[in-house]
Amino acid sequence: MRYVWWLVRCQPWRVLRGTVVGTAWMIGLSVRPYLVSRAVDDGLRAHDTRALLLWVAAIVVAGAGLSYLGIMRHRTMTFVREDATARSAAVLLRQLSRIGAVLPRRLAAGEVATVGGSDIGYTSQVLTMTGPGVGAVIAYAVIAVVLWAVSPLLALCVLLGVPAIALIIGPLLRRLERAESVYRHQQGVLTTRAGDIVAGLRVLAGVGGRGLFARRYAARSQDLLAEGYRVGAVYSWIDALTVAIPGLFLAAVVWLAARMAVAGDITVGQMVAVYGYVATLIVPVWFLLEGSYGVIRGRVAARRIIALLNLTPDHVGGPTPHDLGGPAPHNVGGPPPPDVGGSATVPGARRPQAGSAPVRPADLYDPACGLTVRDGRLIGVAADDPAEAIALADRLGRYVVSDVTWGGVPLTGIALDQVRARILVADHDSYLFAGTLRDILRGREASADGRAGNGDGRARAGTCDTLARKGCADHRVTAALRIASAEDVADALPDGLGTQIDTRARTLSGGQRQRVRLARALLAEPEVLILIDPTSAVDAHTEARIAERLRAARAGRTTIVLATSPLLLGHADTVAHLSEGRIVATGTHAELLERDRGYRQLVARGSDALDSEDFTGAEGALR
């Protein structure tokens, strides 16, 4: 509940206003039974028309006041919930931005979707207890005091009856919490599977796997349905008891009050008032029971939010901004992540002294595998195991702690923002955000131009500058598309570069998406570009064009291509064969074909043609 308490502390005055208004509304509900009892005793039984009219007018005024308080209560609590929802969304967005590439490895996409969707809302609903919830408790105490003035026996019935209701409902609430936790987890898993199926629908249809995955999804869906029935069964009992028990309680108290009225212990007006008080008490009791269910559901949701907030970025070593003389890191506007005691560390990891990145382009060296990347060269790396290639890219891009050096300086000793600005790791399956094709390709440049065009009194000059930059930027975009052999992608779209593309560019084919990603990486023009299988989804003719243009476009700048395609490796200045975590051979593509049997088999993708007597023809094809 620490997270919920943080949401309360972020808006204390609004929550206090909700508490005051909610309490006034709850207590105000008990005013009308008192006014009705006075109208009966002082007006009807005494045959006093003037007193009757006076008390009736008071009842009308009380009703109008209660209506106003009810409107203000609902309005205030809506503001409280919406504020909490917005804060939770902002905190989660900052956290997702902070942990970056760690997220897909630690949490399924469906879990993130359900946390960012329904869990935020469920957590915000808990704040309802700060308004009507607090008011219900106070109203319960006030009604008990008022009833004590009428009859101590009736007051004891109320004081003991409401806790008895809580004791009956309590075990069901605990059972509901367990069932809700399981249900929410399975819902996240199913959401992940649905997203995977939608993202790979074309591929599944192509390989005939659509039916298989549909059956698996249907089976998972049935499991979730069964779990949902279990949650619904518990909740139906709680919902039924929420209505039935207060009704029985009301009937018992009214029966007792009627017997006392017949015996002359209380007046008829007091009996009517008792009925009104107890009937009024049903409202706070209902709020408390509903609020208890909301708290249970909110606790489950808050735990899932906390689990996401507790994720920390992979420790990649190096100095922090504070080490370099900048401000100490802090969580701006967000809650202190619960259960997180300090920054993430790796046991045994060294924390090197703050160093400066090489002033000029320099060599990269990875002692873990023995790879040396010469400055300004196009290096190809063919790995027997794709996981080894990805691990190498993570080390060279400083996504993990390593002993990689850059110009003789430990990469982990350089400020991370300098590394990210100069070394770019481009995965062939990296995320494509929604937007126009131009914005997707240009990234931060497009955002900067958008801000420049939103005028501040210099709109005309700013617009001209923006248009000039846009024309220049479009020229660079077109050049990057040509290098990636993706001109046809823009040409096929109805509005060219201005065409809106949905999230992950699902309207494009796999090969088109891959070429768009390559063009985006080229447009960034990093000092060191690391490409992971950049052409795995394109045909051979397109791949040959990309290989030739890539070499020309990146001439004089360091480029590392992690792939097993002979078309790409054939254009590399140097090719390294990575096997079992070590570089076992280096040379040109042709040289490795001649002397490295494992390399020949790798680039031939397991073909046995290289082992036949017709090796010369196969070698020529690979070259």
Image (tube, rainbow, N blue to C red):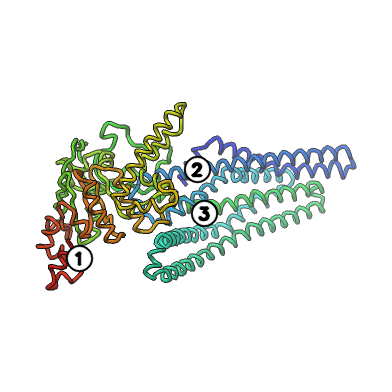
| Residue 490 as seen in the image, left or right of residue 623 | right
Q: Judge by depth and name the residue closer to the eye, 22 or 441.
A: 441
Q: Which quadrant would residue 411 be assigned to in this image?
A: top left
Dot 3 amino acid type: Arg
Nearer the observer: mark 2 or 3; the answer is 2
What's the distance in space between the residues labelled 3 and 1, CA to CA? 56 Å
Residue displayed at 36% across by 40% down: 444
| Residue 30 as seen in the image, left or right of residue 104 | right
Disc on res. 297: 3
In this view, 238 is above or below 463: below
Residue 388 appears in view: no
**Percent x, y for residue 577?**
16, 58
Residue displayed at 39% across by 62% down: 200
| Residue 396 as seen in the image, left or right of residue 130 | left
Residue displayed at 26% across by 33% down: 324
Circle 1/circle 2 CB separation < 8 Å: no
Q: Which residue is mark 2?
A: 86
Q: Judge by depth and name the residue closer to the eye, 571 or 339.
A: 571
Q: Judge by depth and name the residue closer to the eye, 201 or 84.
A: 201
Mark 3 or mark 1, earlier in chain: 3
Q: Quadrant of the C terminus?
A: bottom left
Disc on res. 604: 1
